[in-house]
Amino acid sequence: MPKTVVGISGSLRNGSLNTLLLRAAQELAPADLKVEIVSIRDVPLYDGDVELEHGIPAPVQALKDRVAGASGLLLATPEYNNSIPGVLKNAIDWMSRPPADIARVFRDRPVALMGATPGQGGTILAHAAWLPVLRTLGTRTWNGPRLMVSRADTLFDQDGRLKDETLRKQVTSFMAGFAKFMGA
């Protein structure tokens, strides 16, 4: 039975390059690894008063349960203003609530980071900004070859399929490496 990885895109935009990259990872993952792409669109902005009065919102609880039940987590992060996207950080912050759930959701969970941008610099600063967050949550971050895609707006066809053969090979290798890291 294949291991399951939850894939989350850090962009809510229709046609998001990071969502397209996740779909490519899903397509190119080894047979023993299933990538389930989930949306964070319904995750509200974190508000401690909401948590205190109403508990964890249903979309957040569903997301936490999916991640907790998976073998790993794959984050596709854009880079906004040289750092991490607020919507993805917000989702991770919600998933760390209450603090007693951090171990169930994150502790020792294999996590891989990938990212795509239309710019030239890739997503290296977003990747770097995620590392202390993931360390604080106690994840096992995979530090294999990085997948930071520059000029991503030129690499997908009109149907959103990855058309660049060099990048297809990189994504295939990246996913095989993550699968091996997880023991799949």
Image (cartoon, rainbow, N blue to C red):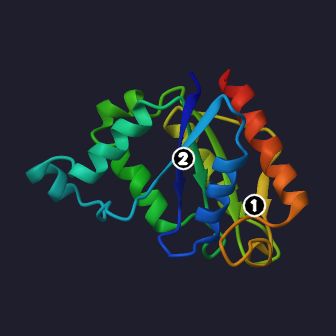
Q: Position of residue 5 (x, y in %)?
A: 55, 37
In the image, taking residue 161 as reference, residue 46 lies left or right, namely: left
**Amino acid on which the number 2 mark rests in the picture:** Val
In the image, taking residue 19 as reference, residue 48 lies left or right, namely: left
Which residue sits at x=54%, y=33%?
A: 4
- Residue annotated with mark 1: 124
Instruction: Name the quadrant of the N terminus.
Output: top right
Q: Position of residue 48 (x, y in %)?
A: 22, 55
Q: Secondary structure at mark 1?
A: helix
Q: Position of residue 177 (x, y in %)?
A: 78, 34
**Amino acid on which the number 1 mark rests in the picture:** Ile
Neighbour class for label 2 at 10 Å: few (<14), some, many (≥20)? some
Instruction: Name the quadrant of the C terminus.
Output: top right
Which residue sits at x=74%, y=26%?
A: 180
Q: Secondary structure at mark 2?
A: helix
Q: Is residue 59 above or below residue 16?
A: above
Residue 115's image quarter? Answer: bottom right
Per the model, the C-alpha gap separating discs 1 and 2 is 15 Å
Which residue sits at x=63%, y=64%?
A: 20
In the image, taking residue 127 as reference, residue 46 lies left or right, namely: left
- Residue annotated with mark 2: 133
Q: Is residue 11 above or below residue 51?
A: below
